[in-house]
Amino acid sequence: MANTLTVGQQAPDFSLQDADGRTYSKEGLAGQRFILYFYPKAATPGCTTEACDFRDNLASLTAGGFAVLGVSPDSPEELQSFAADESLTFPLLSDPDSAVAKAYGSFGEKTIGDRTVEGTLRSTFVVDESGTLQLAEYNVSPDGHVRRLRETLDV
């Protein structure tokens, strides 16, 4: 994993489309706090667990002043299907060339079974109103992650 980010740094700029073709960017989110989480592949067991956990805790995160955005290399069509199948009501952003994942240090080698592959790494970032990283977590486990995040954010 190259160029990992740390708390206090400015979050890298991004501009990505969601499943419905709407564009989300760091600039467009200026003045609000948001959680940007990266996941490897829609509709896989770990990614579904994590996405549904964000869905089930979205009201408390939103009430605490945080928008939630998921990012993966999946196509908009795959994201649309995933969102519909799991009743996900927060934006899922398509990063097909993994450029944003790379900018956030969320791309690299990982082991799947007995194979080593390169791809998006599960990680989560909390960005404050000024675009500064309030939290940067790498190698996140999907189980219990949102509960721990809510405790950290006190929401």
Image (cartoon, rainbow, N blue to C red):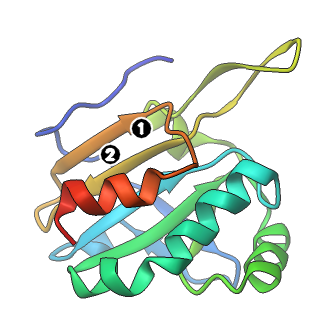
Q: Quadrant of residue 150?
A: bottom left
Horizontally, residue 100 falls left or right of residue 36, namely: right
Q: Residue at x 72, y 61 (%)?
A: 48
| Residue that numbered label 2 is attached to | 12
User: Visible in this render: residue 59?
Assistant: yes
For marks 1 and 2 on the same chain, the one whose residue lies earlier in the sequence: 2
Q: Residue at x 17, y 37 (%)?
A: 7
User: Visible in this render: residue 93?
Assistant: no
The front one of 5 and 96 is: 5
The location of residue 96, given as percent across then percent down, is 72, 51
| Amino acid tagged 1 | Tyr
Q: Which quadrant does the C terminus fall into?
A: bottom left
Horizontally, residue 63 falls left or right of residue 89, namely: left
The location of residue 6, given as percent across then percent down, is 22, 31
| Amino acid tagged 2 | Pro
Residue 3 drawn above or below residue 65: above
